[in-house]
Image: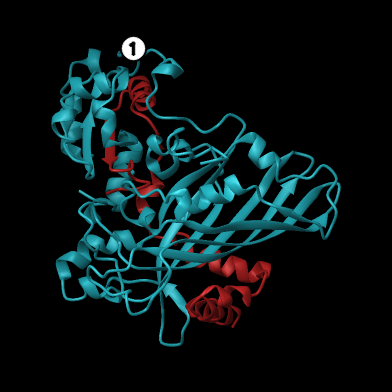
Chain colours: A red, B cyan
Amino acid sequence: MLQRSILRFVAAFTAIIGAAAYAEAPKFLTPAELEQLHQLIKPQQGESRWMEIDWYPNVWEARQRAAAEGKPIFLWAGSGGAPAAGC
Amino acid sequence: MGRVPALWTDETIELIKKHFVAAAVPTWVCRAEGPEGDFLRRAGIDKRWVTSSGYMHCVSASGKFLGGRASLSVLKEFQQLPLTERAPGSVSVPDLPAAQAVLPSPPVGGLVLKVHARFLSSDQNGQLRPAVTTDFPLMRDKPNVQKSWALFLQPNTEYLWLTRDEWQSLVPAEPTTGETLVVPRNIVLRMARFHLTPQRATTSEGHIVSVRSVKSAELSLLVDDASPQRIRYQATGFVRWGSDYDESQATTPNGPLAQGFESPLYGRLTYDREKQVFVQFDLVAPSHVWGRWGDANGKSMYVERPGRSPFGFALELATGNSPTNRLPPGGNGRYVTEATGYFSVDQ
């Protein structure tokens, strides 16, 4: 019930056009309401699975680790640097 | 290459975790001066990463090109190298002086937040739900497009950096229940300009919101519990940037209205006064976006919808020791420069 009410509520007030709608919006969400919304947006089980992998943030550190462990390096490159923005 | 739907299976993920060392970098690194660019060029990567699109390739620590995405065949290729190029410890890789690193690291003593971005829709009862490909008119009759875009509808995660001084400015020395702190403008501007931008869910290419496009960026923290052990805050705020909404102009494809965005901000933070660290930094932005989502050529992207479309951001502390938590904001070190004003107050 909580989930239905908060998600409908947020959808409704954000659908109202203009700043006035936000001025009338509730100032705070309860912890439970916040958690519901947080969970809705965050990756759920089985989603965004590329984030299950540890990604080194630069070539050199990956190279050092690969040399130490005797493993090949798997590079994912993108416009903004995948996976954060995998074009 | 994109996010390659077929790649993220149990088998491949296990293969990568067990047999590979993974790195995520911007394509421009292969053309950068210095040891990192030199290493990639020796493996011929600069001949392969010719645009800013996504690429997946494997190389050895010794600098040999091994093939495309991580696979058993790439692993076999690696195992055929002489032992001097693949045995643990056989390749010497010296530490890289900080001045030669082409990508920035999180600020020392700083705080890193994960920023999850997700396309949303409303169901028949008006409730928010995760968006699915059929919610997008521009791809509705294009099964192949839907297939390639499906993974972009799963949340994308990137990282927001706060310096030590910045997060410490959120902690009053003598907190009082009921007092309100205004979050410094440079922090909220950073959220608005670099992170609360729906493009982060697709391609991050170039999409940093200019300061003059930001019409509102406010966040305040109400102390609702202050004890010797902790300070607990409720956060509330509002961000708006880009065009003013005009329903008659918010058409697609290639409508006349530039992109606009607005969102209330809600959150809950908890500071552990004994450990002197934030142990909770949860924020949500149930947002709306409208107008033109321009691709590299300024044309509408498939995820553009007419009118105002719901979109969501969820922020939380990046905890644990995964190197992924050190990826730069937007996945691109070039977003954290003096020119972009990532850390600046006056930009």
Q: Circle 1 sits on which residue?
A: B92
Question: At 51% across and 75% down in the image, what residue appears?
Answer: A18
Q: Is residue B93 left or right of residue B55?
A: right
Of A72 and B145, nearer the camera is B145
- Whole-percent x and y of residue A87? 27, 49
The image quarter containing residue B29 is top left
Q: Is residue B47 left or right of residue B302?
A: left
**B9 over A58 or under it: above or below:** below
Q: Residue furthest bottom?
A: B125
Mark yes or no: residue A72 visible: no
Mark yes or no: residue B250 visible: yes
The image quarter containing residue B92 is top left
- Whole-percent x and y of residue B161? 53, 41
The image quarter containing residue A47 is bottom left
- Whole-percent x and y of residue A8? 52, 81
Q: Chain of mark 1?
A: B
- Whole-percent x and y of residue B232? 75, 55
Within 10 angstroms of label 1, few (less than 14), some, or many (20 or more) residues?
some
Element type at mark 1: loop
Q: Residue furthest left?
A: B47
Of A49 and B175, nearer the camera is B175
Question: At 48% across and 67% down in the image, what residue appears?
Answer: B287
**B231 over B149 or under it: above or below:** above
**B245 over B328 or under it: above or below:** below
Q: Indicate the amino acid at tag 1.
A: Ser
Q: Residue furthest front?
A: B212
Q: Is residue B81 left or right of residue B218?
A: left
Count up the numbered dots: 1
Of B162 and B272, nearer the camera is B162
Q: Is residue B224 left or right of residue A1?
A: right
